[in-house]
Image (cartoon, rainbow, N blue to C red):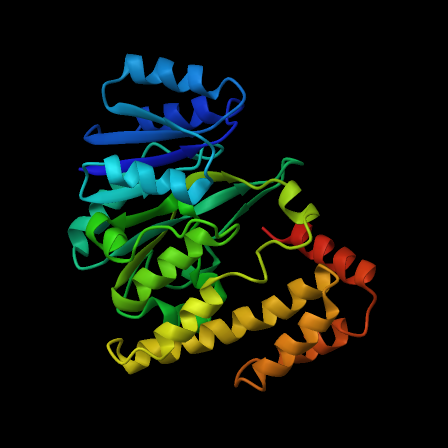
Amino acid sequence: MISVIMPVYNGEKFVAQALQSVQAQTVSDWELVAVNDGSRDGTQGILEGFARGDGRIRLLSQPNGGVSVARNAAMAAARGDYFAFLDADDRWYPGHLAQLEGMIAAYPQAGLLASAYDILFPDGRRGDTTAYFAGKPQTLFFEDFLAAYAQDKAAKCFTMSTTCIKAASARRAGGFRPGCRIGEDLALTLRIALEEPAALCGHKTALYRKAYSTATRTTSFDPDWYFFQEAEKLMADPAIPAPRRESLGRLMAWFGVRRVRHYLVGGRRREAKEALRQLGRPAGLERELGLTRLLMLLPTWAVRQLFLLRWRSRA
């Protein structure tokens, strides 16, 4: 059985649609554990109504502790062998769980499974994440997903709402790290992919709502993301096969370039310069480093505007 993990904070606008999309799945053998993470709107009443009407839906309530704490609480209560995640403002298409079940049957050794998705922008524009599958089979298996991701960033075709993780793998990886403000989902998937195979599907199985509010913050991910420090330890761990540690190193170098840019967006120029110095000259990132050095010459307001324009243009 697949356990659906749904954290909810002030989700009254969309959570009913998310729950209905689970109930509309073409397979019925699932459970859903929703965690009301201290919502201050009408979320609790909506969740209680669905739980009363459908015995497969269970509701937990807790003081606001953040999305990582909420997901961990749901996983601790879940009974399934796999965890499928759905955020309260997204929704699945009817065949999402069936697609995951097919992948689980085909690739039982995979700790991480995921699919592509549609993106809905606030202005009504649509985008999708299927570019990586152009000219390839629509289902791909990776012994080392990090190597594929380091080579082509389009391989990260999934969002948390299209991610499925083997329950034992999620527990072994320690779940989500509380206190990580942004990127807690990517951190967990990277830890799992470092040690276990992954399977990806190019079929779009969900709708992800992308809010412009994300881009109005100074960064789209925390440049002090704790996984930078965790990655250093993992890359020095002899228990992890050397090729995977090398893949992680290449990937984290790319994230390091992004880190410099996000320091610049936040006006933290001294930290940007130091982060750029520490990066050195990683192979394969010459163009990215050149562009980043050009950004160092621009005023903060111009870097922010370029960031916002690029964010709005990307699907």
Query: Is residue 124 shown left or right of residue 10?
Result: right
- Residue drawn at 31 percent across, 68 percent down: 194
Quadrant containing the N terminus in the rendered view: top left
Instruction: Please state which of residues 132 and 158 is positioned toward the viewer in this rendering.
Output: 158
Left or right: residue 205 versus residue 75 is right
Q: Quadrant of residue 44?
A: top left
Viewer-closest of 82 and 269: 269
Inspect this view and state whether residue 24 appears: no
Report the residue at 49% width, 54% height from top: 183
Q: x%, y% of residue 68?
A: 41, 45
**In the orientation shown, which residue stands out farthest toward the front?**
63
> Does residue 115 lie above or below 76 as drawn?
below
Q: Position of residue 117 (x, y in %)?
A: 44, 45
The residue nearer to you, when weighing 43 against 18, is 43
Residue 188 in view: yes
| Above or below for 249 versus 137 | below
User: Where does residue 273 sit, x and y in percent of width and height?
Assistant: 69, 76
Task: Answer with the quarter of the image where residue 155 lies.
Answer: bottom left
Percent across and percent down for residue 160 are 41, 47
